[in-house]
Image: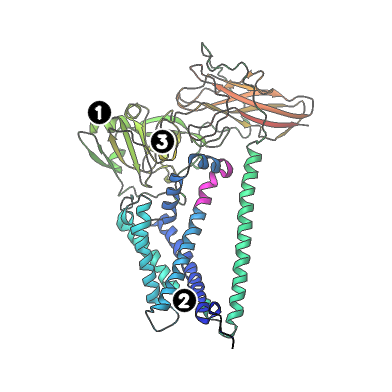
Amino acid sequence: MAMPNPSSSPSRASARETFAAGSGAALLAGLAASGCMLLLSAFAHGVSLPEQVGATITALMPLSLFQFLQQLIGDEAKRYLLVCVLLGQCLVLAASGGLYMLVRRRWPLTSDQAPRLVDGLVLAALLWLVAGLVVLPLTGSGLFGASLSIGWFNSMGSLAVSGLVFALLFSPAYRWLTASGERQEERRAALRERRQMLLRRGLIVSGLGLLAAFVFRFITQGAHAPAVSVRGFRSRIVPPPQPNYGSIVPVPHLSSEITPNDQYYVVSKNLLADPVVDGESWRLTIGGKVERPYTLTYAELLRLPMRRQYESMMCISNEVGGPYMSNALWEGVALADLLGRARPLPGATKVVFFCADDYSDSLHLVKALEPTTLLAVRMNGEILPTRHGYPARLLVPGIYGMKHAKWITRIEVVDYDYQGYWQQRGWSDEAQIRMTSRIDTPLDGSRLQAGSLTYIAGVAFSGERGISEVDVSFDLGQSWQRATLKRPLSALTWVLWELPWRVPAQAGSYSITARAIDLQGNVQDPRPAPPLPDGASGYHTITVIVS
């Protein structure tokens, strides 16, 4: 008589089925709970585990890999990261559901084979403890997010609400997956086939998405752009050129001198949503190595003497010719006045800014005390918009935008070399703006009529060093033509420039390159360099087609 094969025994098959059903139920419940978690993070000051884990991943990521992914995917990289972490979270929840059902099969809480509400509550409680006692501390957020700006209470509460959603859905999802009557096996096979099909399609779509992103950036950033000649390059001209100020002709696509608030560039570390701060309850604390720490309400801050200044800003991640550069009229309180009231102690070297989204950065005390360093509360005559840092953000002329901290809640004077959020990830701490010039019009790849008159125009920016000259080349830097500058609104803003050009009569492809020279005679660096870690350099070059 043949002996039964243990590997095909009903108990083993039942265990696999139990694990699969538990995993599927936890996956469905986890998707809903993860959505609830993201909504609470965005609208109710809750904690988002995917964002905390994602921030930790970027901190641990090698600088070379970070730079490669940024160049490959661009600014959407953080969205892809959020999606990947969310998927990872859901897979962990699925595995936990399967394991829980295996344990329950051996030590059941109820007589029912299918889980009840109590099972969902127990599993959710276990996951809640793991999130608060293990995951959050590993991300540097403290036990149950005690180190986060939202505090441990909001963190514990939002995790509990997400856990409750998971608990309420786990048992119904399990019963729905296993209730199949006589056609249970057929449905299970169809489900497995459907899962495999979805997995294959998901992998294909993800791969095509990454490939499309790479191809798009490869094309739009000119992977085979012609090299600009650096022969005879001088890094400085003495004496500096006198600015060629004059009137410019309004042309399509040229940046407006003042960027409207809704068009001003926005970059933040947050993977999902930026904080929404209540001005009524907001408090600004100024302390650290000072004689007189104090706290201001929003109303008290608004009653302080204000300064208005035009200032342009540029993100350190901006590529040559990139869009992350804007200009506005700002109004705020001089940081020197706020620090002067607190009286920094001898030995203080830096000022640290802590924000509502747990971002932080620092300035050298000398820079913080400059009269143009402001705590801004208004932008282009309006109350500072939420997406630009309401109720207060920092303005630091001459420094890249990552130092212009938004949603500030605390200012601390320190006597050590504090490294902020992005500095811990390899970006420059000095972050001085590198001179740049951008061609706004004509657009790259434009078709121009032979013999017609067109205008080459754009913007140039050098932080607080000003612009004395912008030159345009039609032969990749072999020769240059001087453009007309529009007198800037202040010494802290970009300069609009323009050059009339008679399009050649001969059809073909033509390269147009721009460079700038600051008021000190320093010439824009022609050597291409990526944004990481000190900001991009090189000359913006476009190609037009003459027909």
Point out the tag, 1 or 2, that comes first from the N-terminus: 2
Mark 1 touching mark 2, by CB under 8 A?
A: no
Q: Main SS type for the magenta part?
A: helix
For the question of whether residue 248 can be seen, the reply is no
Q: Left or right: 1 with respect to 373?
A: right
Camera-side mark, 2 or 3: 2
Q: Left or right: 527 with respect to 423?
A: right
Q: Residue furthest bottom?
A: 1
What amino acid is at disc 2? Pro
Q: Is residue 129 magenta?
A: no
Picture quadrant where residue 491 is located: top left
Seen in the picture, residue 455 relative to 136 is either above or below; the reply is: above
Point out the tag, 2 or 3, that comes first from the N-terminus: 2
Q: Which residues are magenta?
A: 71-81
Residue that label 2 marks? 172
Is label 1 in a helix, a strand or a loop? loop
- Rounded to the nearest angstrom, the CA distance separating label 2 from label 3 is 49 Å
Q: Is residue 74 magenta?
A: yes
Is label 3 in a helix, a strand or a loop? helix
- Rounded to the nearest angstrom, the CA distance separating label 1 from label 3 is 22 Å
Point out the tag, 1 or 3, that comes first from the N-terminus: 1
Camera-side mark, 1 or 3: 1
Q: How is the image coloured?
A: rainbow
What amino acid is at disc 3? Lys
Q: Left or right: 423 with respect to 67?
A: left
Q: Nearer the viewer, residue 369 or 453?
A: 369
Disc assigned to residue 347 = 1
Mark 3 packing: few (<14 Cα in 10 Å), some, or many (20+)? many
Q: Position of residue 263 (x, y in %)?
A: 52, 41
Residue that label 3 marks? 403
Q: Position of residue 72 (x, y in %)?
A: 58, 43
Mark 2 packing: few (<14 Cα in 10 Å), some, or many (20+)? some
